[in-house]
């Protein structure tokens, strides 16, 4: 079996919890052999890939350990994955709370940042604003804002468009985010609609991430089984949603802050130029 540095080691650990004793049942099981992986049943997903000593442990692969399951589609998170929105979001919340004289959390502390990451505005207001009437006024204000104007400080992550253009001919692509109705304008603004087959937002499902609802719906739109779809995100919420959906998860971590957010054992991608080689190794 591949060592703990293999790029999908954490995935195998989490999948094996679900699949170790289910042969003949819906979830199946994974059997690992030296030099190959045998997949039995569904929806177990990937076999481990060992680390190549000559490359980064998280992003390298070996040809002697491989998976028999093909990744057939890819779903991306938005904030922190396709775009760097951290400073803009924190600044936005500071101004919002100041405008309504709401007590300000310590936005730039690890604990608060971890709470902010991946959450929709209503969820975040519920976390930090105790007064329900005030929460409603703040949300009503947010709904009336120019969303494209709020993206001024957003930056596409390096090589995102090149990566999407490279993947698009071979893989159906989707976006699944806890943002809501503003995403249509934002996607157009960044010209991501040229590459995406589906855009799923929290207001389109019953529950946002970490519920698996968004990922189930995205996989259905792409007409793929969840276990055949790779989800790429940057937070613990993304990881939990993927695990609950039975979907392989890849952590995007350009700034290498996985340990800070308790995700240091997740399979990691730090450069979108490495995604294609990783996918090729899985096939």
Image (cartoon, rainbow, N blue to C red):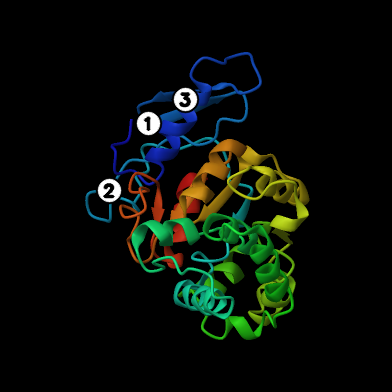
Q: Secondary structure at mark 1?
A: loop
The answer to whether one can see residue 179 in this image is no
- The residue that disc 2 covers is 52
Q: Earlier in the sequence, mark 2 or mark 3?
A: 3
Q: Secondary structure at mark 2?
A: loop
Give the residue at x 29% y 38%: 4
Residue 34 position (above or below residue 21): below
Residue 45, percent from left and from top = 54, 35
Residue 199, percent from left and from top = 72, 62
Q: Earlier in the sequence, mark 1 or mark 2?
A: 1
Q: 54 left or right of 79?
A: left
The dot on residue 17 is: 3
- The residue that disc 1 covers is 35
Residue 259, percent from left and from top = 30, 52
Q: CA distance from mark 1 to mark 2?
A: 14 Å
Q: Nearer the viewer, residue 38 or 127?
A: 127
């Amino acid at each position: 079996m591949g060592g703990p540095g293999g790029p999908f080691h954490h995935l195998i650990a989490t999948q094996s919890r679900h699949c170790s004793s289910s042969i003949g049942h819906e979830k199946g099981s994974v059997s690992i052999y030296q030099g190959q992986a045998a997949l039995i049943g569904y929806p177990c997903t990937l076999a481990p890939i060992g680390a190549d000593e000559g490359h980064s442990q998280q992003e390298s692969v070996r040809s002697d350990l491989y998976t028999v399951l093909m990744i057939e589609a890819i779903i991306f998170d938005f904030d922190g994955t396709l775009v760097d929105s951290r400073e803009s979001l924190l600044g936005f919340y500071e101004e919002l709370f100041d405008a309504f004289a709401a007590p300000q959390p310590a936005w730039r502390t690890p604990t608060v940042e971890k709470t902010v990451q991946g959450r929709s505005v209503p969820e975040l207001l519920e976390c930090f604003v105790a007064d329900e009437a005030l929460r409603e006024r703040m949300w009503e204000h947010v709904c009336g804002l120019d969303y494209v104007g709020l993206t001024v400080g957003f930056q596409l992550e390096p090589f995102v468009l090149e990566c999407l253009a490279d993947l698009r001919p071979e893989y159906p692509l989707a976006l699944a985010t806890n943002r809501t109705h503003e995403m249509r304008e934002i996607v157009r603004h960044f010209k991501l609609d040229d590459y995406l087959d589906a855009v799923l937002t929290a207001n389109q499902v019953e529950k946002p991430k970490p519920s698996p609802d968004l990922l189930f719906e995205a996989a259905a739109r792409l007409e793929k089984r969840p276990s055949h779809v790779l989800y790429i995100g940057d937070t613990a919420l993304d990881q939990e949603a993927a695990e609950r959906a039975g979907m392989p998860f890849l952590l995007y971590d350009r700034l290498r802050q996985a340990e800070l957010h308790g995700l240091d054992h997740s399979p990691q991608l730090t450069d979108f130029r490495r995604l294609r080689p990783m996918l090729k190794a899985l096939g």
